[in-house]
Image (tube, rainbow, N blue to C red):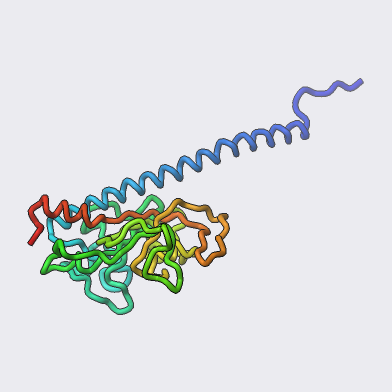
Amino acid sequence: MTRRAPGFSLIEMAFVLIIVTLLLGGLLVPFATQVEQKRIAETQKAMEEIKEALLGFAVANGRLPCPDLVAGAGANDGLEDPLGGPCAAAPGITSTEGNLPWATLGVANSDAWGNRFRYRVTNVFARSPPAFTLADSGTLSVCGAAPTIGAPNTCPANQSIASNVPAVVLSSGKNGFGGVSANTGVANFAPISDDEKENTTAGNNNYFFVSRIPTAASAPCDGAGQPRCEFDDLVIWLSPNVLFNRMVAAGKLPY
């Protein structure tokens, strides 16, 4: 009688490999989630620092900075264009919207996914001279969903988050749609969902931005003219009340 040599058969080895693969898969998924949550937290922290830098710039200069334009002379260098405001027009470019002037502000030059922060400012708050006053009002709004096509001047019902906003800063999130790569200076793919489109110049109304809970790429659209779909943008904005408060406390307002 032939005795079986000690060890595992191919079938047994296959079962072992399957079990190990399942165990590793169960560990790697939570790890990937942890990494992504860390990147989100890092980006949110950087954006809070950006908000403070914008307020500090306003106190020091009596105005907010212009964006760093995404095309043309001096684009993607982190410096505000044009220096000194108001944000003069440039051919084919919305001069009050572009990349965050990170070098001018002395803050992070990109989010945790390697894309530039987008920045939009109400022009009256970037003018110099004369600097803005307590009588001035922001033209930007933040909604929980994109404005309804055909009625672009208001947030959808019960979706208004902030109005009369002087400035908005956003990260294009993990998917990077609508953002500009910090490494190459090249624009990423355009957004797919209406809500992410609204956060770029491709939106229904360039004075509105969307801030809401993220939804995965697998999320279905709601079919009601406001597709939810994928959304992972991160958005912050300057409250006009906080801005005026800082300026008054620093003795820069009222005039």
Q: What is the number of callouts on the image?
A: 0
Q: Which residue occupies the extreme front position in the image?
A: 157
Above-or-below relation of 13 to 40: above
Give residue 196's quadrant in the image. Answer: bottom left
Q: Give the image location of residue 98, x and y in percent.
A: 31, 66
Res. 111 in view: yes
The residue lying at 39 percent from left, 56 percent from top is 211
Q: Which residue occupies the extreme bottom position in the image?
A: 91
Q: Give the image location of residue 102, x and y in percent.
A: 26, 57
The residue lying at 37 percent from left, 66 percent from top is 154
Give residue 167's quadrant in the image. Answer: bottom left
Q: Is residue 226 left or right of residue 250?
A: right
Q: Is residue 247 left or right of residue 218?
A: left
The residue lying at 59 percent from left, 36 percent from top is 24
Above-or-below relation of 26 to 83: above
Work out whether residue 253 or residue 83 is closer to the camera in this orientation and state it: 253
Q: Give the image location of residue 125, x and y in percent.
A: 20, 64
Work out whether residue 116 or residue 50 is closer to the camera in this orientation and state it: 50
Q: Give the image location of residue 230, x and y in percent.
A: 51, 57
Work out whether residue 173 or residue 135 is closer to the camera in this orientation and state it: 135
Res. 186 in view: no
Which quarter of the image is occupied by the N terminus? Answer: top right
Above-or-below relation of 3 to 103: above
Work out whether residue 88 or residue 12 is closer to the camera in this orientation and state it: 88
Q: Is residue 224 left or right of residue 54?
A: right
Q: Which residue occupies the extreme right position in the image?
A: 1
The residue lying at 36 percent from left, 49 percent from top is 43
Which quarter of the image is occupied by the C terminus? Answer: bottom left
